[in-house]
Amino acid sequence: MSEQALGVQYATPGQEREAVTLGMWAFLATEVLFFGALIAAYFNYRMWFGGEFIAAARMTKVVLGTINTGVLLTSSACMAMAVSSYEAGSRRSPVLWLGATALLGVAFVVIKGIEYSLEYREHLVPALNFDLARHGGVAEIFFMFYFCATGFHALHLLIGIGLVTWLAIWIGTGRIDRTGSTTRLIGLYWHFVDIVWIFLFPLIYLAGRNG
Amino acid sequence: MHAPHRESYLSAGIGLRSWLLTTDHKRIALLYFASITFFFSIGGIAATLIRLELITPQGDLGSPDFYNRLFTMHGVIMVWFFLIPSIPTTMGNFVIPLMIGARDLAFPRLNLLSWYLYIAGGLITVTALLLGGVDTGWTFYEPYSTFYATGYVILTIFGIFVAGFSSILTGLNFIVTVHKLRGPGMTWYRLPVFVWSTYATSLILVLATPVLAMTLLMLLAERVLHVGIFSPQLGGDPLLFQHMFWFYSHPAVYIMILPSMGVISEIVPCFARKSLFGYEFVVWCSIAIAAIGFLVWGHHMFVAGQSLYASLAFSFLSYLVAVPSAIKVFNWTATLHEGWIRFDAPMLYAFGFIGLFTIGGLTGLFLAALPIDVHVTDTYFVVAHFHYIMVGGAVMGYFAGLHYWWPKITGRYYPEYWARFAAILAFFGFNLTFFPQFILGYLGMPRRYQSYPPEFQIWHVLSSAGASILAVGYALPLFYLLWSILKGNRAPANPWGATGLEWSTRSPPPPENFPATPTVVRGPYQYDRGKPCMQAGHV
Amino acid sequence: MQGFPIWPARAGAYAGTLDFLYICLLVLAFLTAGLVIFLLIFFAAKYRHGSNAMRGGPSVKTWRWEVGWTTASLLIFFGLAVWGASIYLKLYNPPPNALQIFVVGKQWMWKAQHPGGQREINELHVPAGQDVRLVLASQDVIHSFYVPALRIKQDAVPGRYETMWFRADKVGRYHLFCAEYCGTDHAHMGGWLTVMRPRDYGDWLRAAGGQQTLAAQGEQLFRRYGCSGCHEPGGTVRAPQLEGVFGSPVPLSDGSVVIADERYIRDSILNPKAQVAAGYQPVMPTFDGQISEDDLAKLVAYIESIGPNSGRGAR
């Protein structure tokens, strides 16, 4: 995708850049509502079930979750470096930073996979092997939320990894970005996925661990 | 791009591929027109069968299961595959870029993707319905729909889920287009109200639909995996489903009505040859309806087991959301004062809209009153209320806009006297169909009943009689509009003497919309003693 | 009764109260719609293209009109909201000493249990002039108990108790409908509310059987399910005594306090770990899935019968 003609609907590249940026922000707004609905439902149960629900949260792997938080935050820092070095004009730097971002993203997914496999072994996966007799229905609902929330998050992260990898290759092979904003927009997406995790982590992992 | 001088978007490129792979917003609008008409017909057939069944008190047109599937199909198709997309994807797509002086939407390929997602979702749901359907009602209440309903719940819901992405992308496209692609001189306060209404609708599309997506996914998870997220058997909360569902579905009804209001706001000034009364008020009322509309969902749950305080709050907020709609009705009426009024078909439909929407909206005041709602919720009173707004309002607005922009879209006039006849027929048929249902509702006739106590019969008979007239009123345009494409008189650029930018270009428009980008020099709906002052300074 | 029914029967004074609000709203609606439609027709006629009406008068200050009709709408709507809320609050607060009847909805029938142990299916007999409180439960999906002549309905939600109350004043037989779609025979899930003169109601109670009161049946269940093993003096496990509990505040282990109403009793039986009484271990087993709604009603009636005299739970 080298230099492309400007779409007929745009008068200037600047206009296209503004439109594409606003489009990304609008898209992120939809994602906020998407995850927000899930989080609102989670809060409903947390308030309704109280202690039992929070007790179930203690069965999550907080050490792995915390490591993952660090991984994701670092990846966001790398992404921010990629964006700023790209906009400063460099071409090698962004590719390296983007590579680091993607690698950290993959690390996150791997650690998440380890968590999932541990939970599978402990019979905590609803609909697969959840031990209802031992943990109870409230815990099953908690773990439904756990898997749904972290699962959707991981899905979004995988998409992000794909986008970042593609971008790294694209920049690395010398393509020119007509709008000049693609890197920044993918950065926005990545940071958003990070922010979702920042909400999920305390809600899911830290519930009931404060004393 | 460098088309010959007299080419229109219709003739630029022939063959199936040029249509199925088009990124021209005008062609995409026509793709939507065709598919929406298809889905409307399916929903209409279901309605016909329902009204046939209800002529007699006992169930004689099939089993109770069949009837339950029928009204579910009617609701699902009409809500998600007709009403929600209707005006935005057809007239919105066609007219918005023209109205703002742009050459297309911000993201034309995304626009095409929206259509394909809509078709995919529609085909999935129709397949589910043809395979035997679903009997949950379009509201899919728990735990019935997850643990008790038989039928193709998963497939139907998946179809709606896919179509939801079409909604989101369309809304996103419009928001960016209105913000960033307005032509020179087109400031926000010079935008026609139809653009503002579509913008407000798009805000709702973008913010409410994702909540539906998550709700449907949770429903699917429960049905597929048998985990009790909402089902009390497994410790879940059935009311949580209702809260999540209505958090989307109430704003959804504003998705259905706001574009129609926008259409009326275009038609009334044009056919009264007068500036719209209180333009700024009408504009901000659209935004207010969208915003406050997010705060009233609990009025669907007054008897559901919701807390007292929640019910009180939702009642007050529901009264609040009625205010901007009332303001609009007064503004449209005031626009007629000292005008030069013509009664072409679009204006007849607009009159019908104002009258019927007023009645429907007033009955909303009944429903917002807590104790009255306790009596009439889940009865035909509610059915009548929302049909007055959706059919008397939204569908009438759809037909109004269809006739208004028909010359622009096709380059042809439709036959005026047939159109007026159909409008009047539909108006009378509509009232005969739905007014008796208010009486039925207060009498206590519940909804979703195939059979009913015999004393209710007279009102059902009248209602079904009205439905047969309404059906003719809807079928007629199908025939004469199609006829007009081949045989109608050619229409000029501005057959109605309106002022918007879309009337500054040819009928039908060239592929690039305008030979040269127009510059806007004045606000909309300016008339000088009945003569239109076009928004475009030059074309 | 065939013919042209316009108005539903009124089984009680409340129906009259509601009808008055409704009629006022009807008048308001007719006047408003009438005004709008009149103006539409009037302007359409007077200002039709080609008429010689006066146009181009002095330009109107539109904002005066806007403020005017906005304010008028707000005031009227606010008034309606307050009026409606005040009537609704009456619905929400049942009077004390109401006759309590347990109703269970299930696909596709209504079952009622009177305190004297009388059982009905798809029928409800009540005495005229007596406050009646219904405790609604559902055995499967959401149903809704609706009597148009009383002008009230309430959803029966599975997994919890909902309550409603009414007072029927007029002797007669009135339709009972299920008003929340619940499956195949939703339209057939109805019956009759029969309001009787108190003496006739007494005769009916005697004729309808009821060897044992609901509370007495509940006491039997209390022993059969082993509740007395812990909850009576000399029990093997230390558990709260239940005499005098109903309707009283109960401190919970998390520091909050709840009133022991039907909901609390039912939840304690089905999900005892959710709200544990302060000072006790969470060792009560759950009876979820083991006790039917009918039996739950009996147990609740028993616990209520051993509560303090004015024991009747808050909503």
Image (tube, coloured by chain):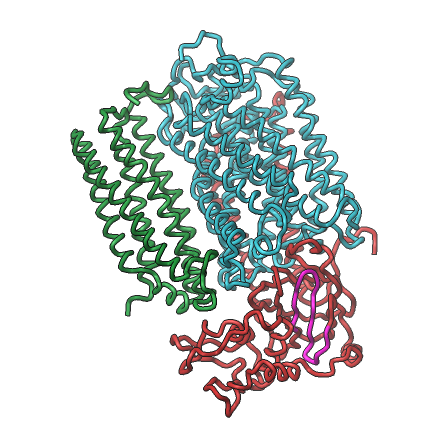
Chain colours: A green, B cyan, C red
- Does residue B20 lie above or below C14 as drawn? above
Residue B355, given in percent of the width and then of the height, sits at 62, 38
Q: Nearer the viewer, residue B528 or C178?
A: C178
Residue, far right: C2
Q: Is-magenta flag for residue C114? A: yes
The residue under the point 51% across, 40% down is B255
Residue B77 in the figure: left or right of residue A10:
right
- Does residue B460 lie above or below C50 as drawn? below
The residue under the point 67% across, 30% down is B474
- Does residue C36 lie above or below C290 as drawn? above
Residue B330, given in percent of the width and then of the height, sits at 54, 39
Give the residues drawn in magenta, as a range: C102-119
Q: Magenta span: helix, strand or loop, mainly?
A: strand
Q: Is-magenta flag for residue B433? A: no
Residue B167 in the figure: left or right of residue C13:
left
Residue B167 in the figure: left or right of residue C2:
left
Residue, far bottom: C234
Residue C80 shows up from this direction: no
- The picture quadrant where one finds residue C99 is bottom right
Residue B288 in the figure: left or right of residue C184:
left
- The picture quadrant where one finds residue B329 is top right
